[in-house]
Amino acid sequence: MRDEELLILIGVVLLVFYAILYGVVIVFLMSLSKLLRQVAPRNRTMEPGQVWLNLIPCFCYVWNFITVLRVSESLRNEFEDRGDYRRGDDHGQALGITTCVLNVCQWIPYLGSLVFLGAVVCFIIYWVKIAGYNRELAEAPSFRDDDDRDYRRRYEDEDDDRPRRRRRYEDEDDDRPDDDRDGDGGYRRRYE
């Protein structure tokens, strides 16, 4: 009976651990998505919604590398566009790649438990760096053209191909003349 209780306890502890781990990862991905939304669309090499692909098991080990590279490249493009050239700043790329490599190395037997602590430390430092860029982009004036605002206004719903419905008028709100209530511009009366 004690072995069964121990197995149940271990299972509950692991379940709570993974729930907390996924919660932390979701908050981190929200931060990354927010960062990419603050980058002008022309400077992005990755759309904000693509960061959520990091939640797919096994696939995330490859997509983590792609995410780090594209986020750092998007940041580099944005800062250059704003006229802020940062010589020697890799925009978190080296730290992010180190975190990804340590995450992959956790699967190596006997080495995984030793690498876990390093992966957690690098992850926290990378997250703090991303949060700093997030704050910096939010506070710094943007030197973008007004084209970005027009672009967002025009194309924010570009994938919606449904035809637009005509507005239905109520009798009391209708501005059309009384003889055109049927909406045909008087066609029936003229040609019948």
Image: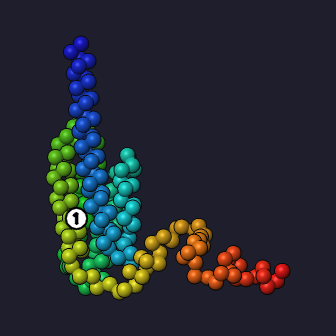
**Front one among 30 and 14:** 30
**In the image, what residue occupies the spot 40% across and 84% down?**
147
**Front one among 53 and 144:** 144
**In the image, what residue occupies the spot 36% across and 59% down?**
51
Vertical order, 108 against 29 (above or below): above
Q: Position of residue 76 (x, y in %)?
A: 28, 75
Tell me the quarter of the picture where residue 6 sits.
top left
Q: How many marks?
A: 1
**In the image, what residue occupies the spot 30% across and 65% down?**
34
Vertical order, 32 against 86 (above or below): above
Tell me the quarter of the picture where residue 52 sits.
bottom left
Q: Position of residue 128 (x, y in %)?
A: 17, 61
Vertical order, 165 against 126 (above or below): below
Question: Which structural element holds mark 1?
Answer: helix
The residue singled out by tag 1 in the image is: 130
Q: Position of residue 47 (x, y in %)?
A: 39, 66
**Mark 1: which amino acid?**
Ile
